[in-house]
Every structure is written in C-alpha cells, then in structure tokens.
C-alpha cells in the first residue's frame, strides 16, 4: 500500500534521507523507530506530500501521485479547535474532505474510535490528550482512509490511553488499512506493530518482524545501533 | 552583584534584538527630526519678528530724522500717527522641545487705534490645514505619545517571552523574586530612555543658551518627564506581573496606551465640544460691527459723555473746557470707545474659553496625558494661557496708544523731540 | 472555503474576550456616532442663532447708505456637513466665521482649536477616531496569529490532508476577520443613517457609501498585510511586532513627516509676506478713499464719456459708487492673483501628499474619510471661494445701488444671506482619484502576493 523506493531528501547540505526504501502492506502496522533527527518526520512529510523527494519515488496504493483522499494523518498533538465539541470538530474536518455525515453517523465514528458517548458534545478544551487522539483517529477513519500516518502517537499518553490506541490501530489494520507510525517508544511499537524499521541519519539500518523479537531484544538492538 | 548581572544580560538581550535596536534608532531619529523642526520653527518666528522690528526701526529712524530737521514738531495726533506700533511674541528658547499650540495663533501684530486682540491677523500662520490636523513630530509629542509605545516594544516580552517558551518557572527558581527580576529589567529600559531624552533636552538648552535663564522651567520639564515615565512604567510593570504570555501583555499594554493617549483625551475633547460648542463670538461681531456703526452715528455730545466715562481725567484737560469734541479728535474718541466695547466683548469670550478650560482641567485626574501635555506646553510658553498673556500685552499697548492719542491731543501737548522719544518708549514698552 | 470561514466565525463568536471587545467597540461606535450627531446638531443650532442675530442686525439697517452697508458687511459661517459627525477633518483647526465687507478680504477666524487648552492630539472621540486608530489595532490582533496558530498547533497539516488548501485557509481567515471590520463599519453607517436620514440626499448617500468603501479597503489591506507578515515570518511574535511597528509608522510618523516635507517642497508665504505683497499690489490700484491717482482720472474720463456729460456734478449717478466698484474690481484681481496662487500651492501640496498613499495607505484613507465627510481642505477652499464670490456680488450690488441712489429698508431686506452650496462628491471625485487608486492597488497587490506566498510557503 505504501511504497518508498530509494528516496533521497536533503535540506541544503544536510542529508535527511538516504536511498530510503520501505513497504507497508494492507493490514500491516509499520513502526518506524529512530532518534530525534533520524528522518522519521521527513519520511512522513514526504508521504503526506508536504515535501518533494530529491530522487526515488513514493507510491500509495500503487499510484505515483499522492492522493490525500485515502490518507489519514494523526499528528503527535491533535490540537483540534478548542471552541468546538468533539463531534463538531469531526463534522468540520469531514466537511472539508467532502463528507457530510449526520450526527448519528458522526457519533458512531467517535464510538468506534473509543470515545465515550458523553464526551461527544463537550468542548475539546476539556478533553485529555488521549481523547483528542481518538477524535483525530475518527477524523481519519471517517474519511475511509486506506493509509494511516501517525507521528509519535503515544507521546504523552498515559498507559491506559496508550493501550487503547494500540487496540484501535490493530482494529484498523484488521480492516485492511496500512499504518505507518513514527515513534521512539520501543515498547509501544513492539506491542502495536507487525513490522519495525530503525532509521539512523536517514538510513534504514534494520527491519525486523515484531513477532520475532521481544521488547528487551528490541531495546538491545536499538541501543546497539544508536551507539555505533 | 546579581542586579548588575541582570542589567548586563538585559543589555545583551537588547543589543541582540534587532527589532528593539531598530525601534530605538527610529525613536532617536525622530527626536533629531523633531528638534530640527523645532529649531526651524523657532528660527522662522525669530526671522519674521526680526524683519518686522527692522522695518519698524527703519520707519522710526526716517520719521525722527524728519522731525529733527523741523523747528516745530507737529501736534501729538500726527506724531503719534507716525509711530509704527507692533506686538510680537518671542518664541521661548525651549520651543524646540515642544511647539504646543503655537501653530494655532499668530505671533506678531501691527497695532493701530482700530485694532483688537481678535483681529484677522491674530489667527494662525498660513499653513496647510491638513498638515496641521496631522500635527508635527515635535519633541513633546514624542515624549507624551511615542515614548510609552517605545516602552511597550521594549518591555512587552519581559517575562512574556520566558512564559511563551515555558521557562518562566526556571527563572523563579533560579532568582527567587520574579517581581524584582522584572523590575531590574524595566530599570534598564527606563534608564536608557530617560538618558536619551535628557541628552536631547540638554542639547536644546545648551544650543539656545537657556540653562540659567530658564532653569526653573527646565527643572519642571524634567520633573514632568520623570513622573510621566514613572506613571507608565508602573502600569506596564503590573501588567507584566499579572499577565501570561507576550501577546497578552502586548495587547494589554497597547490597550492602556490607546485608552490613556487616544480615547480619554478624545472623549474629553468631544464632551467639552458638546458642552461648549465652538462659539461664533457674536458679542465680538456686534461690537465690531453694529455697535461700532452706532457709535459712528452718535452726536458729538453723546460721544463726549461716552469718552469721559472711559477716561474721567479727560475732563481736566484743556480741550475739555470746550465741552465738545474737536473734529480732529473725533476719530480717536471713536476708536477709544470701540476699543472699550471690544474689550468687554473679548472679556466675555475669554470667560467662555476659561469655562471650557476649567472643564478640561477638571478632567486631569482621569486624563493625565492632557495634564502633562498642557503643563509641558505651559513651561515652553506655547499653551493657550501663554497666548492669552500675549493678547493682554497687545491690549495694554493698544490702551496706551489710545490713551496717549486722546490725552495728549486734549491736553494740546507741545511735542518736542524729548516728548516724541517718550512716546516711542511708551509704545514700545511692551515689546521685547 | 465556506466551512473554514464559518468555522473561523464560530471560533471568534465562542471566544469570550472577542465578544466582550466586539460588544465594547459596537457600543462605542453607536455612542460616538450618536454623540457626534448631537454635537453636530448643537453646533448647527449655535450657528443658526449666530446667523439669525447677524441677519437681524442687517435688516435693522434702515437709513444707512449702501457704502456704509458695504463697510458694515456681512458674515459667512462655515457650514457643518451632516457627515462631519463621523469625521471632523480640518474643521476643528480652521476658522468658522469670515467677515465679508467692502474693500478688503478677510481671513476665516475663530477656530475651535484656538479657543481652549490643548486636549487631544488624535482628535475628538468621533467614529473616525475609532475607525482609523482603534478598530485597525483590534483587527491586527485578530489576524496576527491566524496562520501561525494553525501551524504551531499542527492543525495545518490536518486541514491540508483533509483536502483543504493553504490558499483557502488563509483567505477564509482574512474574509472572516474582514467581516468583523465591515460589521463595525455597518453599525456606524447604520446609526448615522437612522438619526440623520431626513437630511439625506443622493450626494450624502454616495458619500456614505464611498466612506464605507474606503474603510473597507483599508481594513482589507491591513488584515492582508498582517496575515502576509505572519506567513512570511512563520512566528507570531515577530509578525505582531513588525505589524505594530508598521502601523505606528503609518498612522503616526509618516503623515507628520510627509506633511512637513511636502510643505518644505512647496513652501507657503508667511502671513506678513503675503499681506505685504497684497498691500503692495493693492496700493498700485485705485483707492476709493484716496482718489488722487491716474487711474481715478482715467475712470472719470471714461465715465464722463459714457454718460455724455462734461463734469462729475452733471452725472445722473453718484460717481463714488462707480469709483468704489472700480476699486473693488481691482481688489478682486489682486485677491485672485494672491489667493489664487496660495490655493494653487495648497492644492499642489495636497496632490503631492496624496502620492504618499503609495507607501502609506493610511494617508489615502484619511484623505478619503475627510473628503467623503466634506471636512477636508478642498471643501474648505470651496467654502472660502464661495464666500468670496458672495462678497463680490454683495459689494457690487451695494456699490451699484450707491451709484444709482434710491435705497430703502426693503432693499437691504431683499439681499439674501450667504448660502453655501455644498459641492456634490462626484464633482470633486477626480481630486481623490489617487486615493482610491492607491487603496485598490494596495488591496490587489497584497491579495496577489498572498496568493503567491501561499503557493510558495513550505508547510513543514
């Protein structure tokens, strides 16, 4: 579903990505690990179309042109409009992408994304970070995204919310979506993802199957790569 | 030592903030420009006054030479008629520090026996009215209106920046007293501003050699400057202390500036205009026109009575014994009576203006900017009252002229060169 | 785009501080417009009283001869326009009364500014003060973080991924904030209309519409510029600081600096120089009171020929009336020469100043605001000219009557007072074309620049 082939990206003299190739298939959750400045956000911005690659190509759903209609994006901090309620925020973002749902439909999206019914009509300014994250996912979900891109989704979440997020992502993957999440939370990535890649200085230095490795082993591998 | 360090770091902060340095330089440039304009206005007024005085001297010299060659001088009416009489208002040497209301009034006047202090030539100099509405960048404007804005630009991110960047608590932990830390940073900017302003003030004082002659005014101006800066600093200090984030602080500071410098003075101005609308001085128009013409039509005996009511001592003169007015003296009698009428009409106008001024003064407790502005103009002799004083001086000269014309002619004084010189002295007595 | 616009407005209306400020500004505008009208009405009443008083005196002039009446003279009062309640323009500092008499042309006297201590530097609290100084600041504060707030919160990416474009987001925000400015403008014009509609005619309506248009364009410029800077700097504090510095330059520094510079480029004479030059030219002509020069002899000759008599005593008319009118006409030509040159100089100054609108749209706004309110220099000069032409007609009428004899109280009563024919705005339109052009130019350039910048701006 998401395919990056030998993608290069530089900012002036700084090489942010070096011949990066990776694949995220339908039903797969890919965890991209790396230190600050490793190139995780650059990778996401390239897939989102906010940056253009210097060379190489990016395909989504086998198409070379980036089609935002099938992409859902969940930023690190889902700072929605504080003066709107959860359901109003969802309605607004749905309308922007051309979907006009009624209140029941909007409510069911929020329910499916795990937001308690009684919170739907409360102002976002009263939401916790986890609740905002759920609305963010509902926004992507409601546009029937096939591809989900998540930038540090678990950062700042409490363990319960973090766990709920994992379950939600797994559910989305089970429905056939391809999910790419950039993170430096080794434990959460190991728990959520099927596939893990480690980025260092713009190079994908290691790819592994999450099932084949324990959390402790992942930490060891990661630290080993980072130190060398 | 810690205080010194904060000041030192504030200096570093200031010099590395290009926006602040640029704003400061603009202010300095504006000060230079305003003082230059002030000097220019002062020179222009002085040159005009000099020209008038030279003309006057030339005329007097010519006439006195002519008189010296005569064996017998003409009568007092002719001699007095040949004395060109002027009143001028010399600009204060502190004028470059604020032109105040000087562009609203005339500053020189030729006085004839038909003059009054509300004549046509008492109105402002010829100027572009739209330029007058926008005003000048004069030094007092910079102090009263722009200095607070400069203070806002310098201080709005004191603590606000740290709050925006979320390390304000760190400062508190490191230094202890956040209020003292803010105060020290404020002191740096106040000192910088005050020193800058004082340098310019002293420059004007030195160039115009006004230090000893105007020491009390200079002291008062400095005092006024200090309390004004202190006033705004106190308000801004508390805004910084009680607000969160530089945008909120900037918003509140600018609101305070708008309220104090624009809204309150504008409201008082509008209120005063509603209570005392621009008056059309109908009393004065009457005395100048209808009543004057009625006087022209008066029979001589009534004129005599009227004139004696103004100058009772005229009854003791030689001419008074004839119980009538000689035709030659009639015009002087008329002008004296009309002057008397004008004076009482003008007195009413001044009273009406005074009522409006009292209303303005009564607003000072909540309108500090107008208070400072008018006080500042007062010390530089460019406020309403300075021009009112100038009008009184004109009136005194006019009264002297008319009194001389009437008494000297009625006394049938024999004019000699000594008497002529005495006339000159009396009529120039109020000229500087 | 409508969804973003709608969302922006919801955001504003659900913000308590915004609603308080909007309420305060709306109430202030209603009150200032209302009190502006009250002030106007009071001033008009006071002027009418003065006019009646002066007229009564004129009517009481029963037996005097027309020459005395010419010296007695009349007064022209500067009219107060209906929209003066919105923008007083130069009316506070120019004189209000001009004496119209024979032999001499007087200055307009008794300015309000000379009648009291100094009160405000930015003018009375009229709607123009709020609309020119306060509301723009409010709009700047609404606009300065419109881009950066979306960017810094990370919502921008979300909005773009949902199918919106930066162009749409930016222009929706500009339109939302602009609509607030327009609402405040509408309040002012509505209140003005409600309380003075009985005095309205097509001209006043056109003036009010153009006043609305001028302020609308200015607000669009200011908001677009603020957003433009926030896009350029990507940092809300820098954008705010720079916009505020620009605003101070526009409304405080540049008008004063350019005003002074223009006066230096086209200097005006001092009153004493001007008067001396006038007196010099005047003294060369016939002086009605000292008729002893060649011009008088020529006039006598031509008059005798005209009436076919040999001496003045045989004239069927009063020669002094003819003499006075001849002197008057000479005086008029002197006035035309000197005041014509002065007015031309003032007009040149204004024309040069109007060009400063190219770098300071506030100058164009101020000019148009005063122009539409009928309180600018062109309207003032028009009043002075009309007053002078009335004076000429009046004095000619009196001189002719003195020449022909046979006057009575009905003659004086039949003479009409000075009536100011307010020029229609359209007849003055070309004088302000530069101001309009610059406001349009600024708006178009900023919109184009914003379009360009939204395409070039990197989201990351």
Image (cartoon, grey):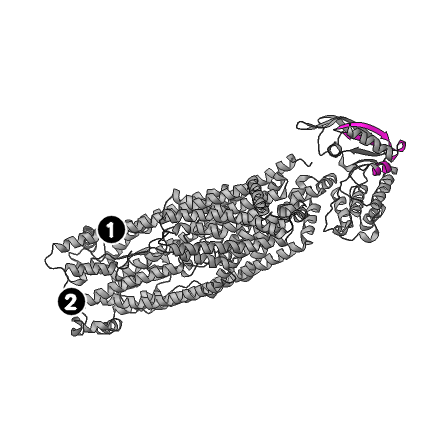
Q: Secondary structure at mark 1?
A: helix
Between B284 and C104, which is closer to the camera in this rendering?
A: B284
Residue name at image x 39 percent, y 51 percent: B95
Q: Is residue B180 above or below residue C448?
A: below
Name the residue furthest front: B1
Between C296 and B388, which is closer to the camera in this rendering?
A: B388
Residue C32 visible somewhere in the drawing: yes
Name the residue furthest right: A212
Disc 2: which chain?
B
Q: Is residue A6 above or below residue B129?
A: above
Instruction: Find residue B137 and report its horizontal and vertical position in percent.
Output: 45, 48
Instruction: Find residue C384 and report its horizontal and vertical position in percent.
Output: 38, 54
Q: Secondary structure at mark 2?
A: loop
Q: Is residue C66 left or right of residue A73?
A: left
Q: Earlier in the sequence, mark 2 or mark 1?
A: 1
Question: Where does the magenta region start and end?
Answer: A187-214
Instruction: Find residue C247 and report its horizontal and vertical position in percent.
Output: 54, 46
Give the quarter of the figure containing the C terminus of chain B.
bottom left
Residue A212 sits inside the magenta stretch: yes
Identify residue for label 2. B412
Q: Is residue B185 above or below residue C416?
A: above
Q: Residues within 10 Å of mark 2 (few under 14, many from 20)?
A: some
Identify residue for label 1. B55
Instruction: Find residue C152 and report its horizontal and vertical position in percent.
Output: 68, 42
Residue C176 sits inside the magenta stretch: no
Residue B128 visible somewhere in the drawing: no
Q: Quadrant of residue B318?
A: bottom left
């Amino acid at each position: 579903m998401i395919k990056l082939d030998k993608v290069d990206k530089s900012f002036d003299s700084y090489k942010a990505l070096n011949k990066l190739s990776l694949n995220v298939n339908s039903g797969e959750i890919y965890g991209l690990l790396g230190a600050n400045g490793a190139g995780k956000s650059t990778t996401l911005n390239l897939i989102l179309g906010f940056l253009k690659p210097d060379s190489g190509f990016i395909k989504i759903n086998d198409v070379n042109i980036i089609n935002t209609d099938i992409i859902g994006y969940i930023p690190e901090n889902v700072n929605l409009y504080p003066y709107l309620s959860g359901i109003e925020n969802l309605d607004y973002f749905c309308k922007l992408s051309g979907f006009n749902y009624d209140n029941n439909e909007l409510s069911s999206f929020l329910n499916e994304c795990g937001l308690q019914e009684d919170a739907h009509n409360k102002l976002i300014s009263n939401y916790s970070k986890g609740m905002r994250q759920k609305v963010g996912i509902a926004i992507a979900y409601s546009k029937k995204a096939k591809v989900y891109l998540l930038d540090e989704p678990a950062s700042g979440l409490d363990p319960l919310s973090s766990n709920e997020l994992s379950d939600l992502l797994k559910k989305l993957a089970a429905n056939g979506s391809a999910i790419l999440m950039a993170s430096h939370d080794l434990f959460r990535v190991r728990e959520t993802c099927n596939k893990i890649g480690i980025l260092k200085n713009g190079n994908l230095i290691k790819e592994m199957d999450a099932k084949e490795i324990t959390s402790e082993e992942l930490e060891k591998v990661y630290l080993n790569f980072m130190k060398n | 030592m810690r205080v010194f360090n904060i000041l030192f770091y504030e200096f570093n902060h200031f010099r590395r903030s290009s926006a602040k340095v640029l704003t400061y330089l603009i202010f300095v440039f504006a000060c230079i420009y305003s003082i230059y304009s002030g000097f220019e206005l002062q020179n222009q007024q002085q040159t005009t006054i000099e020209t008038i005085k030279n003309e006057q001297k030339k005329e007097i010299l010519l006439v006195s030479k002519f008189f010296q060659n005569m064996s017998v001088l003409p009568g007092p009416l002719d001699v007095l008629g040949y004395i060109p009489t002027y009143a001028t208002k010399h600009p204060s040497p502190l004028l470059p520090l604020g032109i105040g209301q000087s562009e609203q009034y005339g500053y020189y006047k030729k006085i004839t026996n038909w003059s009054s202090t509300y004549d046509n030539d008492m109105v402002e100099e010829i100027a572009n009215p739209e330029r007058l509405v926008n005003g000048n960048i004069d030094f007092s404007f910079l102090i009263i209106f722009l200095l607070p804005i400069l203070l806002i630009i310098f201080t709005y991110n004191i603590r606000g920046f740290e709050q925006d960047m979320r390390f304000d608590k760190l400062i508190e932990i490191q230094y202890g007293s956040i209020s003292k830390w803010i105060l020290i940073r404020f002191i740096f900017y106040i000192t910088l501003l005050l020193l800058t302003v004082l340098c310019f003030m002293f420059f004007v004082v030195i160039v115009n050699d006004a230090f000893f002659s105007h020491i009390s005014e200079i002291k008062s101006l400095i005092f006024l400057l200090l309390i004004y800066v202190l006033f705004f600093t106190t308000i801004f200090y508390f805004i910084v202390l009680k607000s969160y984030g530089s945008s909120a602080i900037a918003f509140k500071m600018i609101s305070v500036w708008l309220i104090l410098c624009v809204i309150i003075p504008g409201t008082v101005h509008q209120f005063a205009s509603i209570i005392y609308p621009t008056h059309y001085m109908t009393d004065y128009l009457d005395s100048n026109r209808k009543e004057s013409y009625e006087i022209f039509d008066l029979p001589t005996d009534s004129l005599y009575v009227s004139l004696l009511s103004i100058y009772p001592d005229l009854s003791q003169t030689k001419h008074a014994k004839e119980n009538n007015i000689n035709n030659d003296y009639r015009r002087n009698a008329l002008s004296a009576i009309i002057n008397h009428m004008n004076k009482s009409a003008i007195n009413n106008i001044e009273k009406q203006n005074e009522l409006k001024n009292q209303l303005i003064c009564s607003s000072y407790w909540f309108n500090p900017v107008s208070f400072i502005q008018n006080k500042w103009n007062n010390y530089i002799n460019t406020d309403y009252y300075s021009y009112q004083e100038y009008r009184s001086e004109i009136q005194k000269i006019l009264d002297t002229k008319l009194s001389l014309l009437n008494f000297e002619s009625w006394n049938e004084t024999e004019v000699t060169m000594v008497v002529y010189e005495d006339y000159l002295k009396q009529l120039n007595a109020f000229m500087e | 785009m409508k969804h973003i616009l709608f969302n922006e407005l919801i955001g504003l209306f659900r913000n308590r501080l915004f609603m308080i400020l909007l309420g305060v500004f709306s109430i202030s505008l209603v009150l200032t417009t209302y009190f502006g009208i009250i002030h106007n009405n009071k001033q008009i009443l006071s002027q009418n009283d003065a006019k009646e008083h002066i007229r009564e005196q004129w009517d009481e002039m029963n037996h005097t001869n027309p020459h005395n009446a010419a010296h007695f003279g009349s007064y022209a009062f500067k009219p107060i326009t209906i929209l003066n309640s919105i923008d007083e323009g130069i009316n506070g500092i120019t004189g209000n009364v001009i004496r119209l008499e024979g032999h001499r042309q007087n200055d307009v006297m008794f300015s309000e500014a000379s009648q009291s201590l100094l009160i405000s530097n930015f003018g009375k609290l009229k709607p123009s003060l709020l609309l020119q100084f306060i509301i723009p600041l409010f709009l700047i504060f609404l606009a300065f973080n419109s881009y950066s707030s979306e960017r810094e919160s990370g919502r921008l990416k979300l909005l773009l991924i949902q199918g919106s474009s930066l162009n749409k987001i930016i222009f929706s925000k500009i339109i939302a904030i602009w609509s607030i400015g327009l609402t405040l403008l509408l309040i002012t014009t509505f209140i003005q209309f409600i309380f003075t509609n009985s005095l309205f005619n097509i001209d006043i309506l056109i003036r009010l519409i153009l006043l609305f248009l001028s302020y609308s364009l200015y607000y669009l410029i200011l908001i677009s510029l603020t957003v433009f800077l926030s896009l350029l700097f990507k940092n809300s504090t820098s954008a705010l600081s720079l916009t505020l510095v620009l605003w101070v330059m526009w409304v405080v520094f540049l008008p004063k600096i350019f005003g002074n510079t223009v006066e230096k480029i086209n200097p005006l004479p001092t009153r004493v120089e001007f008067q001396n030059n006038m007196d010099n030219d005047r003294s060369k002509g016939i002086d009605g009171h000292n008729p002893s020069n060649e011009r008088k002899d020529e006039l006598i000759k031509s008059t005798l020929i005209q009436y076919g008599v040999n001496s003045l005593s045989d004239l069927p008319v009063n020669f002094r009336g003819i003499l006075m009118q001849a002197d008057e006409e000479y005086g008029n030509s002197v006035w035309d020469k000197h005041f014509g040159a002065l007015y031309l100089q003032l007009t040149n100054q204004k024309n040069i100043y109007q060009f400063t609108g190219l770098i300071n749209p506030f100058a164009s706004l101020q000019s148009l605001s005063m122009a539409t309110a009928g309180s600018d220099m062109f309207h003032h000069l028009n009043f002075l000219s009309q007053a002078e032409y009335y004076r000429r007609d009046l004095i000619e009428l009196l001189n002719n009557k003195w020449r022909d004899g046979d006057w009575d109280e009905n003659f004086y009563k039949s003479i009409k007072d000075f009536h100011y024919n307010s020029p229609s705005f359209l007849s003055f339109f070309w004088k302000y074309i530069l101001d309009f052009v610059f406001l349009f130019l600024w708006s178009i350039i900023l919109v184009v620049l914003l379009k360009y910048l939204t395409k070039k701006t990197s989201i990351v």
